[in-house]
Image (cartoon, rainbow, N blue to C red):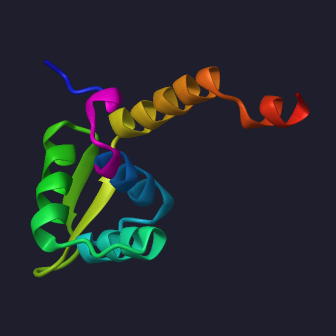
């Protein structure tokens, strides 16, 4: 059974957004960006199992940047998942419509 974006944790969705916004970031760069954005320390023990879960779900591709560093990139399935999630969120709450009311 395929994992949908709605079944991901909030942290995993945050990882998808960070990966989508960067060009083939390393796991370290992904973790640093999440830390910067949230102001919370992200341990390796939390980061890498969640990145691996996204890879296993087919939402993220993992490749070798060099012999010591991996990179991460969204797959087509990952991009579709983020778009579907955004549509769902916008259907529930459109901040522009809320401001106009």
What secondary structure predominates along the stretch shown in magenta?
Answer: helix
Seen at 36% across and 46% down, the residue is 13
The N terminus is located in which quarter? Answer: top left
Question: In the displayed structure, would residue 73 be above or below residue 66?
Answer: above
Q: Is residue 59 magenta?
A: no
Q: Image check: 95 left or right of 35?
A: right
Seen at 29% across and 26% down, the residue is 4
Q: Is residue 10 magenta?
A: yes
Q: Position of residue 88 (x, y in %)?
A: 53, 23
Q: Image check: 66 left or right of 80?
A: left
Q: Position of residue 16 (x, y in %)?
A: 37, 50
State the image quarter where residue 8 is shown. top left
Specify the segment rendered in magenta: 5-11
Which residue reaches farthest right? 100
Which residue reaches farthest front? 101
Closer to us: 97 or 25: 97
Q: Position of residue 69 (x, y in %)?
A: 18, 77
The C terminus is located in which quarter? Answer: top right
**Residue 74 visible within the image:** no
Seen at 36% across and 65% down, the residue is 24
């Amino acid at each position: 059974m395929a994992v949908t974006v709605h079944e991901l944790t909030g942290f995993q969705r945050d990882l998808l957004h960070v990966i989508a916004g960067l060009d083939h970031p390393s796991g370290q760069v992904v973790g640093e960006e999440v830390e910067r954005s949230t102001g919370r320390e992200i341990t390796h023990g939390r980061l890498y199992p969640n990145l691996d879960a996204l890879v296993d779900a087919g939402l993220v591709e993992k490749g070798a940047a060099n012999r010591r560093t991996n990179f991460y990139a969204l797959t087509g399935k990952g991009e579709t998942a983020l778009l579907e999630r955004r549509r769902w969120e916008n259907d529930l709450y459109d901040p522009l419509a809320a401001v106009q009311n």
